[in-house]
Amino acid sequence: MIWLSVVGFLVAALAAGLIVRWGREHAAVYSETMPQRFHLGDIPRLGGAALLLGMCVSWGLGVLQSTIWSDPGSLRLGIWVGSWLVALLPAALGGIAEDMTQRLSVRYRLILTGASGVLAVWLLDLTLPRLGWPWLDTVLTAAPWIGIAIVVLAVAGLPHAFNIIDGYNGLAGMVALIVCLALAHVALQVGDRALAALLVSTAAATAGFLVWNYPRGMLFAGDGGAYIWGVVIALASISLVQRNSDVSPWFPMLLLIYPVWETVFSIYRKTVRGVSPGVADALHFHQLIYRRIVRGVFHDDESRRVLMRNNRTSPYLWGFTLLTVVPAVLFWSNTPLLMAFCALFVISYVMAYFAIVRFKVPHWLRH
């Protein structure tokens, strides 16, 4: 598992470096008028391509190790890993195409991530067997199509949730890395080494991308990177719950409550304002932190000043993420407690959001 991670990291880092060197012409299509843009200059948004390459090479070597080299690491990675890649490709390629052209509408991207969800159900036989409440579990048993629908919704929706939080250097990438490692930790706890190997390799490829993304901001993940993280983490979360009855379905929910709730709250606030949820704006939680908590940086070079302030935003959200990841990892089998932490996060998020909007932020947070 370690050498697969090393290979994934090196391939992703090398591919990302080549994109930084040769892919700058594609960055010019990303308009400076977009409200979610918080950087100066033309930065390539093809980090997803490097991430995908690192994962494919690492996963492929894992399959070779298990099927040809007598599986010395007991990873049990079989041909079924190819089904994961097939399910991943519609969303990943659609996101990368959008990063290169800026011409793929939200509707088509939703269709492509939905196609990944359908393929996951068809090829991987994924379903949600339980929800942690006895009466809801009875409903799922009587109507299994509900579990299938939830799987399609999760695989289709989580990529867009990661895309929403992908606003600053190191933000979405570090959240994805932390979540992958948390899922891998629990997978190892229940003896699911195959799933852990896929997740650790994904985290390693993400780290290879982050070499160029944080703190220098020389490459962005783009829609492609966000969609890859979203699909892989959704597939892994559902597989972990489906294959291991000890794991609460609320464990991945608590792990991912930040991007999920950011998406739900964004849809709500846009709807009440009469704005389409598909329209980009600059009122997400991480953008408010950038504008109203992170203090300005004094530097003679404007691009350097923007970069330094950009980099100071992500650690706030890393800490916010760890507030959910730590209890999720500690109590991964305790459904009531996990549900309570989810509710606590939602309440804390809403209170923090309105405190920032109303300029009622403690002085010690502003530095």
Image (cartoon, helix red, strand yellow):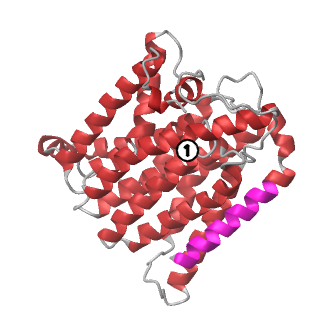
The kind of secondary structure the magenta stretch mainly shows is helix
Q: Is residue 190 left or right of residue 124?
A: left
Asked whether the viewer can see residue 321, the reply is yes
Residue 129 lies, with reference to residue 295, above or below; the image says below
Residue at 86% x, 52% y: name it: 22
Q: Is residue 17 magenta?
A: yes
Q: Nearer the viewer, residue 210 or 196?
A: 210
Residue 136 lies, with reference to residue 359, above or below; the image says below
Judging by the rendered image, the residue that carries numbered circle 1 is: 172
The number of callouts visible is: 1
* Image spot of residue 59 (x, y percent): 57, 70
Corner quadrant of residue 246: bottom left
Q: Is residue 180 magenta?
A: no
* Image spot of residue 197 (x, y percent): 47, 70
**Secondary structure type for disc 1:** helix
* Image spot of residue 39 (x, y percent): 73, 33
Q: Amino acid at mark 1?
A: Ala
Asked whether the viewer can see residue 156, the reply is no
Q: Residue furthest left?
A: 134
Magenta-highlighted residues:
2-19
Q: Is residue 301 left or right of residue 191?
A: right
* Image spot of residue 159 (x, y percent): 52, 42
Residue at 60% x, 53% y: name it: 89
Residue at 70% x, 62% y: name it: 13
Q: Residue furthest top?
A: 274
